[in-house]
Image (cartoon, coloured by chain):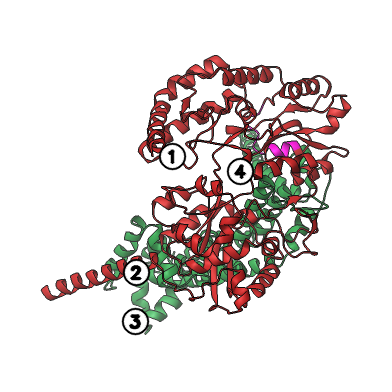
Chain colours: A red, B green
Amino acid sequence: MRKNKWFAGLASLIVLTTTLAACSGSSGKTETPAPSAPSGSTAGETGKALDPVTLKIMMWGNRPADFDKVLAEAESRMKDTLNVKLDVVFVPVSDIVQKSQMALASGEEIDLIWDSPLVSMNSNIASGYYEPLDELLAQYGPNILATRPAEMFEGNKVNGKTYGIPLGASQYFGYTYLVRQDIREKLGIGPIKTYDELVQFAYAVKQKEAGLVPMLPSTSFFSEASFRSRFDQDTQIRRTQAMSTIMLYYKNNDGIVYNLLDEMEPTVWDWIVNARRMYQDGVIHPDVLAVKDYEGEFSGGKAAIIPVNDFGVKDNIQQALAKNVPGSKVEAVTFFDSTPKKNITNFSQWNFISIPVTSKHKERAIQFLNWTQEKDNYDLLAYGLKGKNWEAIGEDKYKPLDADYAWFPYLWIWNPTFERFDASQTDEVVELNRFIKEADNFEKDILTGFQFDSQPVLNEMTKYKTIEDKYYAALFNGVMDSQTGYDNFKSEAGPTLKKIQQEMQKQIDAFLKR
Amino acid sequence: MVNSDRLFSGIVYAFIGLFVLFCGVPFWMVVINSIASESSLQTSGYMLFPAEFSSYAYEYLFQGRQLWSSYGVTVVITVIGTILAIFLTSTLAYVMAHRKAKYGRVLSFMTYFTMIFGSGMVGFYMLVAIWLGLKDTLWAMILPYLINPFFAFILVAFYRTIPYEVNEAAKIDGANEIATFFRIIWPMTVPALATITLFYALQYWNDWYLAIMFVDDYHLHPLQIMIRQLIANMNMQSYLQGGTVSFDKPLPVKGVQLATVCLTIGPIVFLYPFVQKYFVKGLTIGAVKG
């Protein structure tokens, strides 16, 4: 009996030490690269193939019909150099969080994984699931570094380290109102240049187009009054890292967190009052809070104006609308001021590709990504087979030829250098997209690289979010009376938001001191 | 008297009729709108009689090979899984219910224990994916559901209603335990087994969770995953502007959702009437006399 106990104790000790050893082993470098350490092109010259390795890559989305053909082409291009085979797993977007959490927590071997701060990236980093990439990038990823401005890396570091390669083709997020061009022309109104003209158009629609809702905003940030902050060129009111709304906000470039419940910003108040007026006048959709698929309503021909991300008109909306309402046309209206250095950005990105610490092929994974950051290879993986899936228009545009290779570089390789513009977009839109690619066109936020750690105020965040969900969209779309709505919001959420603000300011001050 | 009887049955019929309507209308809406054209869905929403019909949603679903392979996977899992599960659950329950089985109580406790305490997700995942190495196999979608403690206890309760004298009679006639179980007890418990079969079959048919967790290889995706993938990502692509998803026609987003509902409920819905004839009670009446 006693012996057994000793034996059990010894056994568990052995198990424990081996697990620990395994952990430390996997976080170190387990794959010793070939001494010649080829990085893409140089390997091609020496023509010396590495040992074959299969990289497992996890991302979300649909497997495009031609994906296997594109992979075969990519693998044959790499055959004599990197010798990488790819096992790409596409997870339904509704399950990516749970699936990736499970895989990471159980230590399953994955070599590259998509993640985003909007999903679970920060908590995954905090749990130590991701490998810091700075050294690997310096050694094996010259192309990865060269295809992105240094600010893109700097703005997305966590605790001073790069845990994921930022995927993005712009340094600033463009926003647009989609407007029914055919209705505008029918009413004899000229091209819309300012917000006031947009409102005039909306009122004209209200008067003369029965059955068409002039304006259909969405909820949260896409509420009418908060969406306008994207065109606030003078004070640069913008969201913080803590939440997706502007209840806490930055202004100018002073490193201070402002709080709308603490002190109402006059500009924002004007926006809210304006939204209330438009709602009461029936210009904003009466059921704005209940409409779920607001883009669908627009493409069904039921609304004249909606706010959306990005510059330009989305293809699918244009096509759906043309089919649903014959003769209709959509135009993109943005009030973005493309004067260099006028807008402030912190270069944060939404998509990243990371290497889990459990990967046994970390060097090769970076070498592979480095290989994708060459123009020909990027074109292959981003757009598919040239001549079949797409054709090049000029130097930096493309035109898709079929639907068998849907565009998804934002999940693994997206960069501002090689990304092509959609040739169907107007010249103005292409110009805007070209403008936001360049880091030098923007004023650098002094909080670039700051990440908010919400752990100390987690309870407050949850509590606040519940209250905000009750008020925000209703207040910012003018559904509830501005003054009473604001007062109620303030009395319920004021102290909680204040705590979050104070914690955030504390972290910012510490960041700025560094 | 007769009049009030008529009135009563009239009210009952009206009530049941109304109830049928309540259940039937949503079902009708799904079926009829799955063949409505996408633009009529988008412009006028779901209607009892859509203005314009189109089979594009079904064409879109049938165009790939995925639907067929997924159907195959789901059918294989459901058939094999249900057969194995019924076999294991009924034998386990029999031992737990048996008066003279030596470890019946221990087994009961162990089964009951798992109903209350779970190992948590990560432990479960590690067991199946890493230690048993079942990732990307059909077994990963079959084995975890083989014994459902709750169903086992339903069977235990049912076995207990069978008089033990039946066992004794069988023994006297020279049947061993296996023969007793399969030739005497099993036929007497058909109603309960039919119910459990239906439960297991539905569980296997509708499961997407195990597949999401353990199957990365899209060739092995069952029907439910395919649908989940399709619907989730179509919405996502139109939201994220997957560049250029569609060309001459916009994607039939809404139509596909309805069409997939119709396609997936198809075969399994026929299991109900088939199993229903076994939902009868009183088979044991008269088994023991005196």
Give SS at disc 4.
helix
Residue at image mark 4: A439
Residue A326 vs residue B49: left or right? right
Residue at image mark 3: B172
Disc assigned to residue A22: 2
Tag 4 and tag 3 share a subunit: no
How far separated are the C-alphas under marks 4 and 2? 42 Å
How far separated are the C-alphas under marks 3 and 1? 78 Å
Using the rendered image of the protein, determine whether residue A313 is visible from the camera's viewpoint.
no
Q: Nearer the viewer, residue A125 or B141?
A: A125
| Placement of B164 over or under A124, stated as above or below | below
Q: Nearer the viewer, residue A352 or A16?
A: A352
Q: Which residues are magenta?
A: A287-298
Residue ranking furthest to the left: A2
Tell me where residue B122 appears, x and y as whole percent. 40, 59
Q: Amino acid at mark 4?
A: Ala
Q: How many marks?
A: 4
Which chain does the numbered disc 2 sit on? A
Residue at image mark 1: A452
Quadrant where the C terminus of chain B is found in the figure: bottom left
Q: Is residue A291 magenta?
A: yes
